[in-house]
Amino acid sequence: MVHNGIEYGDMQLIGEIYDLMHRLLKLDNESMQSIFSDWNEGDLDSYLIEITKDILGYKEEDGTFLLDKILDTAGQKGTGKWTGISALHESVPLTLIVESVFARSVSSQKDERLAASKVYGLAPNHPVSDPKAFVTMLGKALYAAKIISYAQGFSLIKTAGETNNWDLNLGGIALLWRGGCIIRSAFLDKISQAFTKNPMLQNLIMDPYFVQILKENHQSLREVVSAAALNGIPIPSLSAALSWFDSYRTERLPANLLQAQRDYFGAHTYERVDKKRGKFFHTNWTGRGGDTASTTYSV
Amino acid sequence: MVHNGIEYGDMQLIGEIYDLMHRLLKLDNESMQSIFSDWNEGDLDSYLIEITKDILGYKEEDGTFLLDKILDTAGQKGTGKWTGISALHESVPLTLIVESVFARSVSSQKDERLAASKVYGLAPNHPVSDPKAFVTMLGKALYAAKIISYAQGFSLIKTAGETNNWDLNLGGIALLWRGGCIIRSAFLDKISQAFTKNPMLQNLIMDPYFVQILKENHQSLREVVSAAALNGIPIPSLSAALSWFDSYRTERLPANLLQAQRDYFGAHTYERVDKKRGKFFHTNWTGRGGDTASTTYSV
């Protein structure tokens, strides 16, 4: 199941990168084919990059590109949804894959999108100053987001293993996905090495090899997310990757406010940074007496 | 259930805006309190904005702000997850609320975040050139994202109603949420009016009133997402809102590539833009014979 969820994520990421090349940089299919071909010789070497390269170059008998004539409504068979549901049950933030599942749903709402595109008109336009440098950033952003997606996927497997008392060999699972699988790639060897070297590894992005790559590449992911936001190109999975990464690397998140809100309206209590963990406090925020200020259920 | 899911989204959005004020603009609690107080007089007028204002101003007996001492690990009781699972089952893109549910999960991984913050160091720093104008943009971005979240939530109710043959009055449901509910706001009246005026309304963001507001505010959402990405402030729900909006308003998404990939490795077939909808085509992409190029399950 998680293999297939990761596959949804990989395909969505490649689609977002293709969309940025196509609509923002206005590259033609042959230029894109040549970029994917180059990428397939480096860190991104994988089956899905390879077939994307083939697809970009495929011409019909009349010499026109087939890709341009394919309808943009994606189907799905359900394993992506299943992975997302499992992640929600396990409380594992599997943000990138869930966004990729929802992206297929939006794509299938073709008539609604057509109507909305007429009402809202063209997207804003903030051309990229150096398209060649931007292509390099796209490759780095794709690699960073891919690492994050696999980190989330392996985190789900790890957590489900703990929940169910399964004795899982995460490094072995990574190796398993090389043979004949759609997400097969050189990259899986690195994942396997990370978990073999340290079977207690809390999260893939804490392995020194991946720390180094993310340090080199996260700036590109930022630039790409920023450019896409300003240009109206949807990048649900790339931006989910960045937000998760920035949450995970943040010592202090704004959840203090959220806990205060929950305590305010539902007396859910909170912990304090200046007191021992596991001690819970409640405040009568309004000073008007009574413990809660609302009548709805607690969340 | 959807009321509570929307509540998760609203609280996460306010948290992200607070984080941007606090960590990016370096505003103190009293300045933030005054901004939330202003916002509560306008379009954002709501119970959650009001209590946020109270919380920002609450001081302990020693004169220090309580909010700063609350631990940033959010709890949850399950209705957010339930809403997300329902959306996955119904294939309704409920991206913002699901991100808000996952954000609570990341917040609760405090020890992991602490470790990651040490390894990855400080976030990048790209100061905002005009903080005052940025505060105005934050208010507009929050309003735009809130509309998008409610649009997604009502879309889930509408779809579930169709699935289950429930005769739902969406305008009436909006009104129901005013009385005593945590998401109560002036804004719910506008939603009610939209669905009462047009019970067949496909999506809230297609109602003329909300079209106008989104046209006025989406640029601010873009600027905020871009600034947050460059500054390493996690904004999972704000960016999910923008990506969904940009997907929904896009006539042609990159799902053509995704369908080509699915046809390449799994012979899942595709439709064509130059042929009638409902006719399915398959291509032997490699020209090497055989229908599929992979041995894994189809997705």
Image (cartoon, coloured by chain):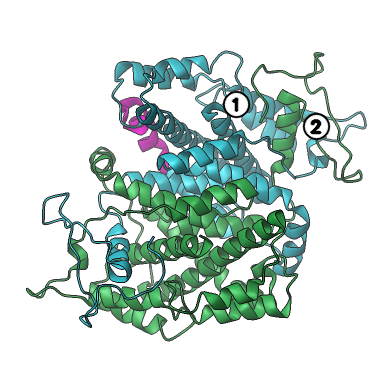
Chain colours: A green, B cyan
Q: Residue flagged by tag 1: what amino acid is it?
A: Asp
Check residue A269 in the rendering and tell me which mark sits there, or answer none.
2
Check residue B38 in the rendering and tell me which mark sits there, or answer none.
1
Q: Is residue A6 above or below residue B69?
A: below
Check residue A148 in the rendering and tell me which mark sits there, or answer none.
none
Residue B45 in picture, x, y percent from top left: 55, 22
Magenta stretch holds residue B207? yes
Seen at 46% across and 84% down, the residue is A42
Q: Residue furthest left?
A: A62
Residue B107 horizontal side relative to residue B47, left or right: right
The chain identifier of the residue carrying mark 2 reads A
Category of crowding for the residue at label 2, using alpha-carbon neighbours closer than 10 angstroms: few (below 14), some (14–19), many (at least 20) = some
Secondary structure state at the residue bearing disc 2? loop
- The quarter holding residue A280 reads top right
Seen at 64% across and 43% down, the residue is B21
* Residue B147 visible in the snapshot: yes
Image: magenta residue range:
B204-218
Q: Is residue B103 above or below residue A30?
A: above
Residue B46 in picture, x, y percent from top left: 58, 23
Residue B76 in picture, x, y percent from top left: 68, 37
Magenta stretch holds residue B37? no
Category of crowding for the residue at label 1, using alpha-carbon neighbours closer than 10 angstroms: few (below 14), some (14–19), many (at least 20) = some
Residue B224 horizontal side relative to residue B243, left or right: right
